Amino acid sequence: MKRYTLPQSSFLLLLAIVTLAFVWILLPFFGAVFWGIVFAIVFAPLYSHLLNALGNRPNSAALLALLLILLMVIMPLAMIGASLVEQASGVYAMIESGQINFGRMFQQVINALPAWALSLLERFELANLTALQAKLTAGAAQISQATARYAINFGSKAFDFLVSTTVMLYLLFFLFRDGRTLAARVKRAVPLASRYKKPLFDNFTTVIRATVKGNVLVAMAQGALGGGIFWFLDVPGPLLWAVIMAFLSLLPAVGAAIIWAPVAAYFLITGSIWEGVVLTVFGVVVIGLVDNLLRPLLVGKDTKLPDYIVLLSTIGGMALFGLNGFVIGPVIAALFIASWDLFANADEFHGE
């Protein structure tokens, strides 16, 4: 084992301290820095194409790439967000006015149930309409309070989002322009042999590209399909449910069904048979097919991760890191598998 001199040990200690301090400084902008790196990796081919098309002008290519990202990603998300807030306010107003009455819906379901199912619900005290209405009233009060707090803090939240987006775009410009140089310096600084660095860095970039492109495309497809069928069946707030289904679809195998399956069950139980049948068939065959076909093709194939690893790492990542976890989880899983594969095949670790 190599022994370091006192000056070398002191320098390594200083290096660790200033690194931790720098990470601590960046923590308030973790999301902006993280997504700046993710976007730089995902859109690196676009930047390379622009760089070649513009005659090797890095600044112009980086600015044009930022403009395209603004037009293709950020502005559509902002427009969807504005429409979502408007539609969510409309749904909330319908709940307040009684047009959407969960108590009445619950009573319709109770009245349509067979006797054995009703007795089972009564055993667990789930058929008590009075108690349920009290809970719904308390829940509505909590929603109202949360809405009021959100309205008060909306200005600061919008300002924080604007600052984070600005920081991300500013960082992204330099990551595009100087990305190859920075990546080379990071690779050189990592204290690993070259035969370990290359597969690990390759896995890192491949998983990020596959996870972001695959999950985002699946989310967009499932959200659009789910919102479309809800609009066709005249379910209130189709855009709101479309966005919720898109976010939930980040959870492989179970995502969007959390929304459409209960609605289909409600239709079937309350006598809206054709609506329930159409939504069930569409959900299983069309929305489910998107998840079952596209996700393994776009995510699992490129990352070479088994489907169950993709599922568990995505759920675990989102539980720990929120929305960022749908990228962080699979990346950690891929690096874990790649590291153990390298260890298992390295002769120096096994005395061969």
Image (cartoon, rainbow, N blue to C red):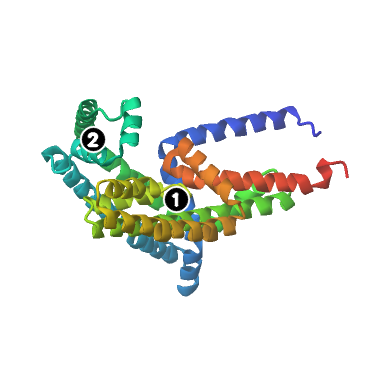
* Element under disc 1: helix
Quick check: can you spot residue 258?
yes
Q: Residue visible at 44% across and 49% down?
A: 250
Residue 81 lies, in percent from the top left, at: 27, 50
Residues packed near mark 2 inside 10 Å, few (<14), some (14 to 19) or many (20 plus)? few
Sequence-wise, the earlier of marks 2 and 1 is 1
Q: Write down the residue under mark 2.
A: 150
Q: Residue visible at 23% across and 39% down?
A: 111
Residue 42 lies, in percent from the top left, at: 49, 58
Q: Residue visible at 46% across and 56% down?
A: 291
Q: Write down the residue under mark 1.
A: 36
Q: Amino acid at mark 2?
A: Tyr
The residues tagged by marks 2 and 1 sit, at their Cα atoms, a distance apart of: 27 Å
Of residue 115 and residue 222, the one placed in the foreground of this image is 115
Judge left or right: residue 29 versus residue 209. Answer: left
Above or below, 198 against 128 in this view is below
Dot in front, 2 or 1: 2
Residues packed near mark 1 inside 10 Å, few (<14), some (14 to 19) or many (20 plus)? many
